[in-house]
Image: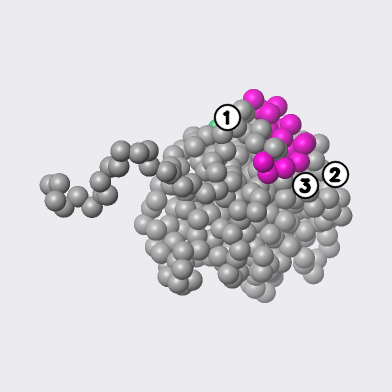
Amino acid sequence: KSKDNILPPLSSSKPKLQIYPQPLTSLTQLRTRYGISKRLAENIAYQGYKLPTEVQLAALPLLMGESGRSREQHKDIDLLAVAPTGSGKTLAFLIPVLDTLFKDKKMDQETEPQAIIVAPTRELANQIVNEGRKLVENTGIRISLVRKGMSVGKRDVDVLDLRGERDEDAESSSDDGEQSSAQKASKVQKPGYVVKSHVLVSTPLTLLHAIENLDGTTTSLPSVRFLVLDEADVLLDPLFRDQTLSIWNACSNPDLRTSLWSATMGSSIESLALEHILKNRKESTNTASI
Ligand code: ADP
Ligand code: MG
């Protein structure tokens, strides 16, 4: 077999691994190396997280700091990360988004969504909200689950501003059993119930309904600067693909940052990545496969 071996012969000296950017070895480096905000660093430490998981040590440097590659065009994918379930992908996609939003210092005035995180099930979406809420403590950043009947984006409807009520969608259980139907009617089913949060987490269909106009057209979301597709292999499989791509298209900001996260390199992801790379004719997607 040795004749066919395509690997170069082992040299006696240690091979020099060129990994760029350098992986994180400690989560405190998020502050020392990338200058994330003190508050966010404190909130991360408060969770007891010290060492980055494998996907975090590889993905965070790609998403933070100057290493972020220059972008060729809108709809580029900034990162495609494949790492097993339970490996800490949520923290990896939340930190760069939350740090950017926090540093903008415009959080008090901004009422339009800045980031959208899509997950295939409501339970997953809710878990992301819960994890995000721990990280945004005392930052002024609001993160919400998009629910049925809500609207997102600018509309020709009466805007009911629910900013004071951020906790009404902080769920610990998976359903809204505690809300009376009258409450639901006034809060959720009222047309024009507009979510006023910087970070929106949603399943694809609920979000699509939330940005759908009465005439069936889709509201575009120019204010959204980050799009995160969690469990992207599922979001791009035939069941969700059209919905996911419609959401992606609605994110019209030319500087949109898009990252895809998945536990498996399913065929839907692979074909999308390939399509994307071919379209751009050169390698423009960072892939971190752990
Ligand atoms: P995935 O999305 O990859 O399946 P999660 O983001 O749900 O994984 O994370 C799984 C668990 O690991 C969560 O309970 C989370 O709080 C925990 N976790 C994430 N990052 C770290 C870390 N750096 N150190 C310790 N625990 C972590
Ligand atoms: Mg996950």
**In front here: 276 or 183?**
276
Q: Is residue 245 visible?
A: yes
207 relative to 88 in the view: left or right: right
268 relative to 22 in the view: left or right: left
Of label 2 and label 3, which has the lower sequence position? 3
State which region is magenta. 33-48
* Residue at mark 1: 51
Residue 29: % across, % down? 65, 36
Identify the element where label 3 is drawn. helix
**In front here: 226 or 187?**
226
The reply to whether the residue tagged 2 has its Cβ within 8 angstroms of ligand 1 is no
Of label 3 and label 1, which has the lower sequence position? 1
At label 2, which amino acid type do we have?
A: Gly
Could you tell me which residue is drawn at 46 percent across and 68 percent down?
282
* Residue at mark 2: 164
At label 1, which amino acid type do we have?
A: Leu
Residue 283: % across, % down? 46, 64
Of label 1 and label 2, which has the lower sequence position? 1
- The quarter holding residue 251 reads bottom right
Q: Is residue 197 visible?
A: no
The reply to whether the residue tagged 3 has its Cβ within 8 angstroms of ligand 1 is no
| Mark 1 nearby-residue class (10 Å; few <14, some 14–19, many ≥20) | some
